[in-house]
Image: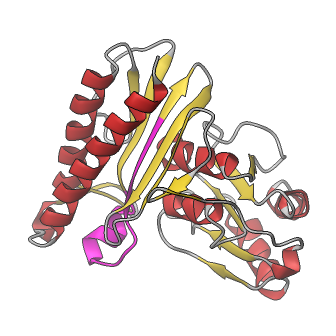
């Protein structure tokens, strides 16, 4: 496998899907919004963008299967699987409020070997292939150098369908409000992770997430020198529904504090 050639082809497909999404936003019809559950929306744009990506990526790597948010394809693929969110931040998109992004990862067995996150409005492209470092629009990126939680800018996402852990989550927010540089919420987990990778945020945590929300962004954080885990500092963050990501200096303190609240 030539991961560079596959990555370059995937980048072009993501750019194509991004242009489609941007064009559709200029003439978006709110009457075509569908609900997948409370506060969980999908549009014809999500579905068409996913189909475009699935069709193109299938040609790039025919033996790969897919894990895709809108279920466009359920092909097998024992060794390789594309993990796709065609529009992360659909609610933002519906309201015309950036950011909203495309997230594409390629898994080999249980590990990620390629990650792309493309922010539609700004046009920024975050990516990494194989063992290479992470890039933003062709320039290498690294996680921040904040050494303490008290010096960190933290990102999170608010629960929108699963409120079982609302109380500990709100308690954690209260603590971080008082003991950091602040807390931000973009509405796109893929972008939160990309921002950790390039040092705009120092750390990120969220629960009730899916593989397509985090696979690409988590890989970017790792390739940019950061650390990623679940709320117990374990490795079940792609399929486990919870994630902590931070630069390598603050990770241990941050995941310990998140765990104090969210594992109680």
Residue drawn at the location 59% of the way across and 52% of the way down: 208
The image's colouring method is secondary structure
Please name whichever residue, 207 or 132, is drawn nearer the observer in this view of the structure: 132
70 horizontally vs 180: left or right? left
Q: Is residue 87 magenta?
A: no
Image location (x, y in percent) of residue 167: 73, 69
Kindly indicate the quadrant of the structure image that contains residue 156: bottom right
Image location (x, y in percent) of residue 122: 35, 72
Residue drawn at the location 58% of the way across and 50% of the way down: 134
Residue drawn at the location 17% of the way across and 56% of the way down: 20
* On screen, residue 82 above or below 241: above
Kindly indicate the quadrant of the structure image that contains residue 81: top left
* On screen, residue 158 above or below 9: below
Please name whichever residue, 129 or 260, is drawn nearer the observer in this view of the structure: 129
Give the residues in magenta.
Answer: 88-105
Image location (x, y in percent) of residue 77: 43, 14
Kindly indicate the quadrant of the structure image that contains residue 177: bottom right
Q: Is residue 210 visible?
A: no
Q: Is residue 78 visible?
A: yes
| Number of numbered labels in the structure image | 0
Image location (x, y in percent) of residue 201: 66, 71
Residue drawn at the location 89% of the way across and 73% of the way down: 148
Quadrant of image for the C terminus: bottom right
Please name whichever residue, 4 or 209, is drawn nearer the observer in this view of the structure: 4
Q: Is residue 94 magenta?
A: yes
85 horizontally vs 262: left or right? left
């Amino acid at each position: 496998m030539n991961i560079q050639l596959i990555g370059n082809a995937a980048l072009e497909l993501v750019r194509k899907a991004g242009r489609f999404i941007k064009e559709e936003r200029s003439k978006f019809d709110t009457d075509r919004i569908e609900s997948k559950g409370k506060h969980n929306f999908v549009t014809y744009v999500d579905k068409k963008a996913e189909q475009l990506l699935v069709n193109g990526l299938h040609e790039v790597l025919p033996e790969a299967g897919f894990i895709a948010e809108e279920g466009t394809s359920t092909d097998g693929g024992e060794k390789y699987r594309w993990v796709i969110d065609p529009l992360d931040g659909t609610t933002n998109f519906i309201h015309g409020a950036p950011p909203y992004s495309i997230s594409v990862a390629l898994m080999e067995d249980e590990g990620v070997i390629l990650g792309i996150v493309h922010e539609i409005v700004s046009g920024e492209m975050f990516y990494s292939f194989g063992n290479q470092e992470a890039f933003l629009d062709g320039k290498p990126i690294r996680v921040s150098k904040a050494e303490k939680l008290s010096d960190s800018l933290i990102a999170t996402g608010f629960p929108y369908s699963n409120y079982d852990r609302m109380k500990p989550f709100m308690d954690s927010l209260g603590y971080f409000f008082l003991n950091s540089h602040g807390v931000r919420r973009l509405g796109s987990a893929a972008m939160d992770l990309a921002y950790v990778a390039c040092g705009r945020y120092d750390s990120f945590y969220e629960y009730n997430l899916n593989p397509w929300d985090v696979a690409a962004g988590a890989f970017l954080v790792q390739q940019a020198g950061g650390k990623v885990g679940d709320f117990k500092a374990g490795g079940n963050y792609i399929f486990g529904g919870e994630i902590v990501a931070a630069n390598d200096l603050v990770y241990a303190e941050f995941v310990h504090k998140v765990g104090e609240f969210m594992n109680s």
